[in-house]
Image: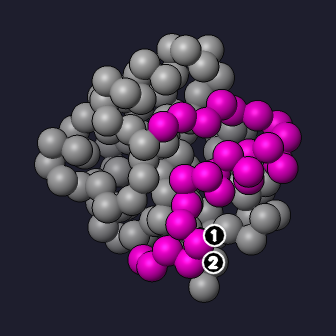
C-alpha cells in the first residue's frame, strides 16, 4: 500500500503539480484547497504526511498546525510547504510545532527526496 500524502494549498496549480510529481514517485496524494477541512481530512484519509502551505487566505498554515496540535488532531508529521526563505520557514516551523518545512519546487526528484525525509519506511496508517 503506497504512503499517503495530504497536500493543503489554495493554489490549484501548486496542488496539481505537487500531486503529479509525488504520484510519479508512487505516493498516493489527496489534496485540499483550504486548511478549514483539515481535521475531517485527517480523520478520513489518515495520511502519512501533510504538506501544508503557509500562505493561505483564510488561515495561514502555521496557525493551522498550532490548532491541530492543541486539539491533538495530528497523527502524522505536518510539514510547512512554501516558497518563503528557509530561515523564515525554519522559525515558523519551530514556533508552531510543525515537523519541519519543505521548499516548493518544480523539481520532482528534489521534492520526493525532501518528502522521504519526513516519512518512515512502510509507516502504517
The residue carrying mark 1 is 28
Residue 120 visible in the displayed image: yes
- The residue sitting at 63% across, 69% down in the picture is 28
Residue 31 image-quadrant placement: bottom right
Residue 6 visible in the displayed image: no
The residue carrying mark 2 is 2
In the picture provided, is 52 more to the left or to the right than 71? right
Residue 75, horizontal then vertical, whole percent: 32, 61
In the picture provided, is 57 more to the left or to the right than 120? left
- The residue sitting at 51% across, 22% down in the picture is 89
Q: CA distance from mark 1 to mark 2?
A: 6 Å
Examine the structure image and report whether residue 121 is included in the region drawn in magenta. Answer: yes
Q: Is residue 67 above or below residue 112?
A: above
Examine the structure image and report whether residue 103 is included in the region drawn in magenta. Answer: yes
Residue 105 image-quadrant placement: top right
In magenta, the rendered stretch is: 100-125
Residue 2, horizontal then vertical, whole percent: 63, 78
Other-residue count near label 1 (Cα within 10 Å), few / some / many at <14 / 14–19 / ≥20: some
Other-residue count near label 2 (Cα within 10 Å), few / some / many at <14 / 14–19 / ≥20: few
Amino acid at each position: 500500500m503506497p504512503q499517503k500524502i495530504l497536500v493543503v494549498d489554495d493554489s490549484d496549480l501548486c496542488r496539481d503539480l505537487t500531486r503529479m510529481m509525488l504520484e510519479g514517485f508512487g505516493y498516493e496524494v489527496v489534496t485540499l484547497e483550504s486548511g478549514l477541512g483539515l481535521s475531517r481530512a485527517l480523520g478520513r484519509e489518515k495520511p502519512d504526511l501533510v504538506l501544508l502551505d503557509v500562505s493561505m487566505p483564510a488561515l495561514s498554515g502555521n496557525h493551522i498546525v498550532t490548532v491541530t496540535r492543541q486539539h491533538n488532531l495530528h497523527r502524522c508529521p505536518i510539514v510547512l510547504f512554501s516558497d518563503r526563505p528557509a530561515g523564515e520557514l525554519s522559525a515558523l516551523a519551530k514556533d508552531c510545532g510543525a515537523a519541519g518545512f519543505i521548499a516548493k519546487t518544480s523539481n520532482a526528484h528534489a521534492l520526493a527526496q525532501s518528502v522521504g525525509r519526513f516519512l518512515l519506511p512502510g509507516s502504517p496508517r
